[in-house]
């Protein structure tokens, strides 16, 4: 079992408040976030961006594992997760995560790659965590 930590601090109201988010590993340390970084163009991060990074990285690792089970190794997997935040049921919700995937996998057929990508989309731990629609555009590149 793997247990990882993340932490956040917040002070102030919703629109004028400021927060800092950190990861237990130190990869993020007191990274600023707030209403202005979430809904405006202020530098910093936001929860949806962090979810997107988590989903893209988890999917890429899962795809690598599944390809390996078929004796295929990717030269490169590029994944972007576009996370959608919308008003829903009187509040806000993450309603969708769309994965854009381009991978260079020597020796892989289009069918084998798409099967592996679909399996990774459905089974990576972050996909399983998200309670939203998950869609994907995947491309095998040479």
Image: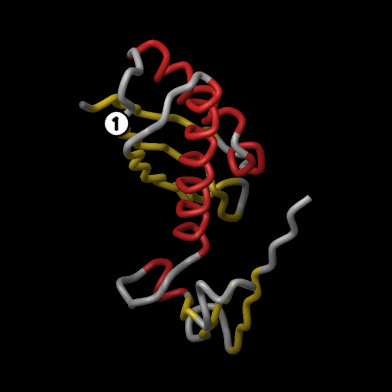
Vertical comparison of 112 with 128: above or below: above
Rendering colour mode:
secondary structure
Vertical comparison of 19 with 111: above or below: below
In the image, 71 versus 5, the foreground residue is: 71
Residue depicted at 44% across the width and 48% down the height: 83
Q: Position of residue 129 (x, y in %)?
A: 66, 43
Determine the secondary structure under disc 1: strand
In the image, 139 versus 32, the foreground residue is: 139
Residue depicted at 46% across the width and 51% down the height: 52
Q: Position of residue 105 (x, y in %)?
A: 33, 27
Q: Quadrant of residue 72?
A: top left
125 with respect to 100 (left or right): right
Looking at the image, which residue sits at the far bottom?
12
In the image, 120 versus 106, the foreground residue is: 106
Looking at the image, which residue sits at the far front?
71
Residue depicted at 57% across the width and 50% down the height: 93
Vertical comparison of 135 with 30: above or below: above
State which quarter of the image contains the C terminus.
Answer: top left
Vertical comparison of 136 with 71: above or below: below
In the image, 123 versus 67, the foreground residue is: 67
| Number of residue marks | 1
Residue depicted at 79% across the width and 50% down the height: 1
**Circle 1 crowding by C-alpha within 10 Å: few under 14, some 14–19, many from 20:** some
Q: Position of residue 140 (x, y in %)?
A: 29, 24
Q: Position of residue 119 (x, y in %)?
A: 54, 23
Looking at the image, which residue sits at the far left?
142
- Name the residue carrying label 1: 104
Q: Quadrant of residue 139?
A: top left
């Amino acid at each position: 079992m793997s247990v990882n930590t993340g932490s956040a601090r917040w002070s102030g109201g919703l629109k004028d408040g400021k927060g800092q988010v950190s990861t237990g590993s130190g990869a993020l340390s007191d990274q600023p976030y707030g209403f202005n970084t979430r809904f405006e163009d202020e530098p910093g991060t936001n929860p949806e961006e962090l979810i997107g990074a988590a989903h893209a990285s988890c999917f890429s690792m899962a795809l690598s594992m599944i390809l390996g089970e078929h004796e295929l190794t990717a030269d490169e997997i590029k994944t972007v997760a576009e996370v959608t935040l919308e008003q829903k049921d009187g509040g806000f919700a993450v309603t969708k995560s769309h994965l854009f995937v381009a991978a260079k996998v020597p020796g892989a057929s289009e069918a084998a790659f798409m099967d592996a990508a679909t399996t990774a989309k459905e089974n990576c731990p972050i996909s399983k965590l998200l309670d939203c629609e998950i869609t994907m555009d995947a491309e095998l590149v040479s």
